[in-house]
Image: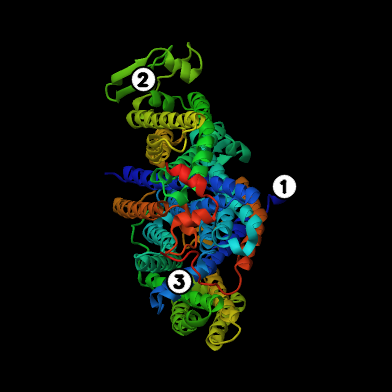
Amino acid sequence: MSMLANFDFASFFAVAAAIVIGLYVVLDGFDLGVGILFPLAPRASDRDAMMATLEPFWDGNETWLVLGGMVLLGAFPLAFAILLPAFYVPLCLMLFGLVIRGVAFEFRSQGGRFQIVWSATFAAGSFIAAFCQGAVLGAFVGRNITVSDGAFAGGPFDWLGLFSLATGLGVVAAYGLLGACWLVWKTSGSTQNFGRELMLPTLLCAGAAILLISVWTPFAKPQIAERWFAWPDFLWLTPLPIIAFLAGIGILLTRWSEREWVPLALSLLLFVTSLAGLGASVWPEAIPGVMTIWQASSMHRTQVIVAGAVVIIVPIILAYIGYGYWLFRGKTKPVPEFPPR
Amino acid sequence: MDQLLLSRLQFAFTIGYHILWPAFTIGIAWFIVVLSALWLRTHNAVYQHLVRFWTKVFALAFGMGVVTGVVISYQLGLNWSGYARATADAIGPLFVMEVLTAFFLEAGFIGVMLYGQERVGEKLHFVACLIVAIGTVISAFWIISANSWMQTPTAFTTTADGRFVATDFWGVVFNPSMPYRLAHMIAASFITGGFVVTGVSAFWLWRGRPADQPAARKAFSVCLGLLAVLMPAQMLIGDQHGLNTRKYQPMKLAAIEARWDTARRVPINLIAWPDEKAERNDYALEIPLLGSLILTHSLNGEVKGLKEVPASERPPVLPVFLAFRVMVGCGMLLLAVAFTGLYLRWRGRLYTTRWYQIACMGCVPLGFIATLAGWVVTEVGRQPYVIYGHFRTAEAVSPLATGAVAGSMAVAFVLYNCLLLVFFWYAGRLAWRGPMSGLPTHPAVPLATVAAALGQIPQATGGAK
């Protein structure tokens, strides 16, 4: 234990939380994205195929969100206790969006007359959840959170602003892009073509949003501008936007490629670099302008236990989640289990 | 209405709706494991039909449990940020462990369980069912452990700024009331799930459609056999849990019994209407001495009364008192039904007694009602504390605008009730169609022919009589 006495757990958890949230964003991102594209699907059979590609995975993807929340609780309880009430409205809306989307999965598969209602519910839930996640992200980076005596002291709509609306829509578009790339990888025929066609509009929207956010944040907060344009940080950080830009161009060029995994891989790269850019803007603050990750941390004992659990168990989880993806590899066959009556 | 009361109502409502699903799915998951094992051993087609049928129902309920559970995990911080801040260093790791060791396990293998049958073969499919079932119990383990620590906190110190810090991780996990609470909850889940299976099977028997009979008889018989053991076991566990509550949460026990004065050789209140202002019970029907005997296992045992502490330290008496009687009443009824099943089995009339089938159908909601009532006893009985004796509910609540809490409460109320109705609709439709609806039957072929083809027709006609 004495070895661990001087270990910087706060930095460890900040990186761990970033990885978990990143995993959540790319994994649930593609399945929320499929939901966002749902209303645009030309045929009911395409919607069946789209849904079928997600069925074995969505529950596991969503679990990363719960893990993210609980790791924040275990590692940065003081920030957790301020951020959640501060984002009460968008987080509640996000949860309700995830609720209706999750049950739509189950009920839509039962078939029957009301299937169209469940398709609409699925799409609406996906959109609401994605938009709220983007809005929370934007509010976290770009807006000031009022705190007094270690507790949130602002109003329920402090998070709302042009910037958080823009990031909300940006995340919707970016998830749409991930969803389109996922469909190209997992389906064939008309559904695949539908995915390919949607890559261009979603990429343009997501690219515009990322560009807007990249330009806007340094102006919104001088400390972020300082971070990005100060030497030598500039040297380390410039590759991020360059890689993101190249990834975007890559998706544009490989939209109709025979190698169907390439656009998905490139869009994942685009996501990772964008998230890393945001993380670099915020580091090392747990709540921008209020407290650092060290001030927000839990006690040393708690950190040791949580870190131990994460380090030992997450690789095992990744192994069997990977097994699941391998098991359901290849194109999804949109065959209903039993023919509807 | 003030923000604290609204937050409490909202949490009671969302967790009350959530608990219905685990209470059901834990039992059903293990029932599916039993059925899969029987299918693997015997390759009797009846088991396969039952596995298919109950897996479909399980999938619906599991989905409901997952989505309402995600809400709960975030509500800890959304509505109860004071609680999150104060307790993260004691029970925060337990929530992390629940996600890492249970949620991922369930989520990772539910896909294989529901959609992977052809891809993995029947042995691995059985393993997936088993892992999901184990996951449900691990999840219950951590969450009941956290809840028990809030009831009987041990192995912690407090900091100057009011945070609870664990001094021993396993001391927190295995706190004094945890084993009783876990056993009580798991048994409750088995019983709740078991009576749903029994009720649905009774419906198939009662309707008398020949093709359904073999599956209905098997499920009916297996479940009633298990319940005849589980019901008395649950009574024993409950009794032990009561002794534990008397030791660690005397005021909760006093509220359960509506006992105002500390005394020995106390009677038990069968029914009464506790009057909290006057500190007495109206319309009480008492049985002398039985209170001490049940609560302390001794005729001369002392039971603490609510007047031991000032009124501000007492839990609300009326809801706790009534909820306890609802729980025990449901338990008595279910015990009677389970033992009647034993008697009918002995007389050889288990599958043919019509009134008993109707009684079993009527028992379907009782397990849920008893579970909810039990949670009211446990959670309301802990008031006015979140962490019994140490941290008040009023300190735990988030600094939120009343309108925001009222808004989320209203949305949750409408949404959850709609979802429950929709679940009843789809699950009811599955039950109505019966266990054989998964068969690839041609519409022109009557179901009786299918049953004959399966070689089950002699048994089936016998059951229709």
- Please tell me which of labels 1 and 3 falls first in the chain: 1
Residue drawn at 60 percent across, 63 percent down: B118
User: Label 2 vs label 3: CA separation?
Assistant: 58 Å
User: Which amino acid type is marked by label 2?
Assistant: Asn
Whether residue B62 sits left or right of residue A238 in the image: it is left
Foreground: disc 2 or disc 3? 3
In this orientation, does residue B159 appear?
no
From mark 1 to mark 3, how far is it between C-alphas? 56 Å
Badges 2 and 1, same chain: no
Of the two numbered discs 2 and 1 in the rendering, the one whose residue sits closer to the viewer: 2
Q: Specify the label residue A48 is tagged with.
A: 3
Can you tell which quarter of the image residue B333 is in? Answer: top left
Q: In the rendered image of this protein, does residue B285 appear above or below residue A293?
A: above
Q: Which residue is mark 1?
A: A2
| Quadrant into which the N terminus of chain B falls | top left
Name the kind of residue labelled 3 in the image.
Answer: Asp
Q: Nearer the viewer, residue B444 or B195?
A: B444
